[in-house]
Image (cartoon, coloured by chain):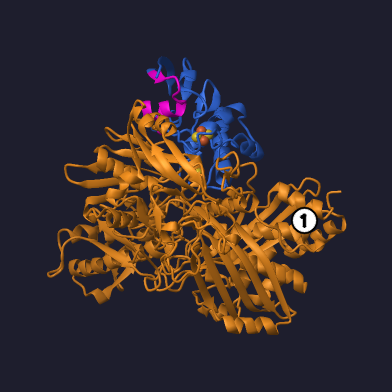
Chain colours: A blue, B orange
Amino acid sequence: MSSQKISLTINGEAVEAEVEARTLLIHFLREQRNLTGPHIGCETSHCGACTVDLNGKSVKSCTIFAVQADGGELLTVEGLANGAELHPLQEGFYESHGLQCGYCTPGMLTRAYRLLQENPDPSDDEIRIGISGNLCRCTGYQNIVKAVRYAADKINQAEGAD
Amino acid sequence: MSEARELTLEEREASIGGIGTARKRKEDARFIRGQGNYVDDIKLPGMLHGDFVRSAHAHALIKSISTEAALEVPGVLAVVTAKDLEPLGLHWMPTLAGDKAAVLADKKVHFQNQEIAFVVATDRYAAMDGVQKVEVEYEALPPLIDPTTALDDDAPIIRDDVASNDEVGQGPRHHPNHIFEWNVGDKEATDAAFAAAEITIREKIAYPRCHPSPLETCGCVASMDATNGKLTVYGTFQAPHVVRTVVSLITSLAESNIRIVSPDIGGGFGNKVGAYPGYICAAAASIVTGHPVKWIESRIDNLSTTAFARDYHMVGELAADKDGKILAVRAEVLADHGAFNTHAQPMKWPAGLFNILTGSYDIPVGHVSVNGVYTNKAPGGVAYRCSFRVTEAAYLIERLVDVLAQQTEVDKAEIRLRNFVQPAQFPYKSCLGWEYDSGDYPTALKKVMAAVDYAGLRKEQAAKRAAGELMGIGVSTFTEIVGAGPVRNCDIVGLGMFDSCEIRVHPTGSVIARLGTKSQGQGHETTFAQIIATELGIPSDNIVIEEGDTDTAPYGLGTYGSRSTPVAGAAAARAARKIREKAKQIAAHVLEVSEQDLEWEVDRFKVAGSDVSMTMKAIAMAAYSNVPEGLEHGLETAAYYDPPNFTYPFGAYICVVDIDRFTGDVKVRRFYALDDCGTRINPMVIDGQIHGGLAEAFAIAMGQEIIYDETGNILGASLMDYFLPSAVETPTWETDFTVTPCPHHPIGAKGIGESPNVGGVPAFSNAIIDAFAHHGVRHMSMPHTQSKVWQTLNELGLNK
Ligand code: FES
Ligand code: FES
């Protein structure tokens, strides 16, 4: 199989790697980089468990090849917290019981991270639409909406105080 | 320096974080950082990957399998077929229902996507390449897809391997495609009641085949250590101990040489109860190659092969007087079990606990008959977030009561109030054989009616109807039977369905507890710690809960059928109480008083009528240093709990929908769910369970169906077609509760996880059908997709 060199930034760290042309980004992350936060729920772009943030956009990493991330800036759930300090979204999911089995959680968090940059003060409906590419089988979504709201409020308050 | 102030009793109580606290979840810390450890995250040195060659046909003879080309593929190491498994006796496996199932198709395929060969390769891409190169030659046979034709004289015979057997593990049968017949109740008295009744109703009600589809599919990593002969299997197992026993029985490896580990599980909902060919093939491949072997299903594999739920084709009848008082219930059910009877349920119950069909109603007499048949569909009927076949029963009775209300022109809530088992009747013996433990159904329903202003809603509905608009009000007042179960009537492969908890209190007063269950998102690490915290007076934050490793956890039957809290939760309370007994002896010894002088107070034993006391923390240290003569050191124990009865959680749900009469679009305006699960351990977790269960109920009622065409071709086994609602479609939920403790459970808890699924589905269905009731509609078949609702509108000419 033909392989190719790629270089990109993952969670702030410069990474160089050799990948097969057909390797999906999700498999590259999980198997070559040991970033097992992003999960696989369908491999057909429907569930969003594999969501990562690439060049300022939410991307379902089962849907693109690793080589397409060449030169990119990539963020996974593992890069959300600042050391021991949780991202407000992580805190929100914990405080609002926004997760149960946790399988959708990394994708949800990464998607919500981008959503709050696109729309820092979303209504409940906007949150629902904003995360509609990410499926959850456990929570019934209500507490996820609450969790995102929690994070939005916390971020906005902190910014208001600056 | 300021003196440390003595904590008040309330403060001490609060510091425990025990039963009744909305404690934040302990497991979240790893999940929100992406540090969960699910089976596909496991990577062992030298690990290989396996993938299946699957059948293109629903029913066909296998003429040949050629593997040469696959073995040429770079990275492919082996292609395993039934022929290779046969010498190991692993090409077929016994099922929990007393049947057997092919591990790899042996001369014949019985359903589309059935496993034919297992390709083992160095990575998952190479395995897939290999799969594509395996050539299978078939001779197609006529498929049998419609269960109603399964018992015809000229029906194709699906299972040649058992065609001449008088029984296939569940009693006498009378046709090669017949699996069992199960009868319960008094047929003669029921028939007589129907013959004499003023009013009878009869409705054909199907519960379509659907699939639990947790976000994580099934999978495992099997690793045989040749140096010591020990087989370790990490996998998505809801019941790890049962898996260990079954693996031992079919491989004849000593049970002590098998370790089953369930790591974090990404949702189960019944899907991960069964034993699947992937587990066996990965284990066999590891034994043969000496390498760890990973098998992870794709979503398509998941939806089309491992487990399905429901597929019950029911005819239900009620006999009543003209005021709607129910006099008898009767049901005939045809159960489509697919190609192998791999139903996961207590062995004595071929139709599960379907005889909870009486629901919340005081029905004098009844009879139920269920016949199971084989078809050319995937095997593995599981209880999708419900206790065995309880959801089918609840759906049928809740629908029938609505039909009766329409027939007798009694309001749908009122007819329920007229028929409820009354609080004073508990313990209540149902005509179909159960003893309901406790309940207060009228209070629950009245509370919900008041909360939603039921009378106001009916008025609004009448006005809307007059204006030609469609609004539906769905009422569901269900009773479940969960917590399997009493060993006297529940077993799996002969193992009683008890559960267990082992507790160790360390010298400094922290605790580790292990249980025979396995959380798949229910939050056991949080809630079980709360039970033990209250019982031992040790803060739940200092209690670690472990499950899922058969080398360390005590034997238990696993997590499904809402049995964790009713059975393992009871074991936890029992074990903690045993520890407290010993602690009392130690405290009496250290304080030099008699045990009778001691009384328990939150976190300590106190000498009655004095200030002298000894905290559990101090007692823990004494247990390792200063025990009375004759008493062993240490502070640990295990309890195995055999529940005296099932538990019977109940609830009252009201759902309000508005239907667009031109497009068939259904809007859920309001969903109000009151649940009574007895003692409430963690209200936050309970609400989460209800939200999740209701979302699943919504999915089932509105769109989930595994459909086959007449050739047995599965239509839509990906998330493109199979409906998993997103946040946009999913309604918002209002929750409420009453508390009627379970009288036979140590802490009075009944279990909650499954109620919302069981009670939710009929609430949605009833609401949609109620919207059409004034047009004479009594039933519409699930799932209520927009196109099906539109068809009804079109047939009635309402969309004009
Ligand atoms: S795994 Fe990528 S969307 Fe489901
Ligand atoms: S928490 Fe289980 S899928 Fe979302």
Image position, residue B568 (x, y; %):
37, 62
Identify the subunit bearing mark 1.
B
The verdict on label 1 being within 8 Å of ligand 2 is no
Residue stretch rendered in magenta on the structure: A18-37
Measured along the vertical axis of the image, is residue B691 above or below residue B149? above
- Amino acid type, callout 1: Met
Q: Residues within 10 Å of mark 1 (few under 14, many from 20)?
A: many
Instruction: Check residue B266 for magenta coloring.
Output: no
Left or right placement of residue B516 versus residue B115 in this view = left
Q: Quadrant of residue B626?
A: bottom left
Image position, residue B685 (x, y; %):
49, 53
Image position, residue A13 (x, y; %):
40, 20
Say if residue B368 shows up in the picture. Answer: yes
Name the element at disc 1.
strand
Image position, residue B170 (x, y; %):
43, 68
Measured along the vertical axis of the image, is residue B161 above or below residue A13? below
Left or right placement of residue A122 versus residue B545 in this view = right
Residue lying at 68% horizontally and 78% vertically, measured from the top left? B319
Residue that lies at the very extreme toward the left in this rendered image: B629
Query: Of residues B729 and B358, which is closer to you in this image?
Result: B358
Measured along the vertical axis of the image, is residue B428 above or below residue B473? below
Instruction: Check residue A19 for magenta coloring.
Output: yes
Identify the residue position indicated by label 1 in the image: B471
Q: Quadrant of the N terminus of chain A?
A: top left
Residue lying at 25% horizontally and 57% vertically, measured from the top left? B505
